[in-house]
Amino acid sequence: MTTATQVHEAGSVAAATRELERLTTDHGATTIADVVVSKIAGIATREVSGVYDLGGQAARVVGKLRETLPGARDLTQGVSVEVGERQAAIDIGIVALYGVAIHDLADGIRRNVIAAVENMTGLEVTEVNITVHDVHFADEDDRAQDSGDAQPRVQ
């Protein structure tokens, strides 16, 4: 006996297979570089409300230094990927805003990243692992402004 879940999963697999077939055609193959998937995932993560910044402490420090250079914003900060011929696995490190339910934030990030990467590349996203490195308190911005060391808020 076939359940509704099995039918849904079979439909999803068939849709994913059709999407992946677009990467290899009779006229040639399309290869998608890791940096492309990293940028898409980074942008999709920043779109989710509740994400203050991406990356661990070291990545954020380097990112702040890089931002001092004109036009040098790093969209891949805090994102690492492994891209195969038809699949991608993504690891994302974030700083969450205080007060946001982290489990809901992680679910929202996963949904947004998977949708963006799969729609834009045709790759199947096998996993999105999220590490929450820190929680940002709004009063940290206030203290930085009071001391004259205000840093722009990244979202």
Image (cartoon, rainbow, N blue to C red):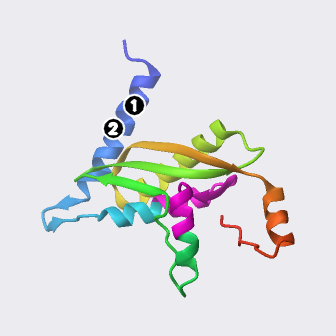
Residue situated in front as seen by the camera: 24 or 141:
141
- Image quarter where the N terminus lies is top left
**What residue sits right under mark 1 in the picture?**
9
**Label 1: how many residues lie within 10 Å, few (<14), some (14-19) or many (20+)?**
few
Residue beneath disc 2: 13
**Residue 138 coordinates in the image, percent (x, y):** 81, 57
Please report the residue visible at 54 percent of the width from the left and 69 percent of the height from the top: 63
Residue closest to the eye, 114 or 152: 152
- Residue at the (83%, 64%) spot, across then down: 143
Residue 66: % across, % down: 52, 77
The kind of residue on which mark 1 rests is: Glu
Drawn side of residue 18 relative to residue 37, left or right: left
- Residue 111, compared with residue 47, is above or below; it is above
Quadrant assignment, res 46: bottom right
Magenta span contains residue 94: no
Q: CA distance from mark 1 to mark 2?
A: 6 Å
Q: Residue at x 58, y 47 (%)?
A: 133
Residue span colored magenta: 41-62
- Front-most of 24 and 131? 131
Q: Is residue 56 magenta?
A: yes
Asked if the residue at tag 2 contacts the one at tag 1, i.e. Cβ–Cβ closer than 8 Å, the answer is: yes
Quadrant placement of the C terminus: bottom right
SS at mark 2 in the image: helix
Task: Please state the horizontal and vertical placement of residue 144, each as a whole percent of the image.
Answer: 79, 67
Tell me which residue sits at (24%, 59%) in the image. Answer: 23
Identity, as a three-letter code, of the amino acid under mark 2: Val
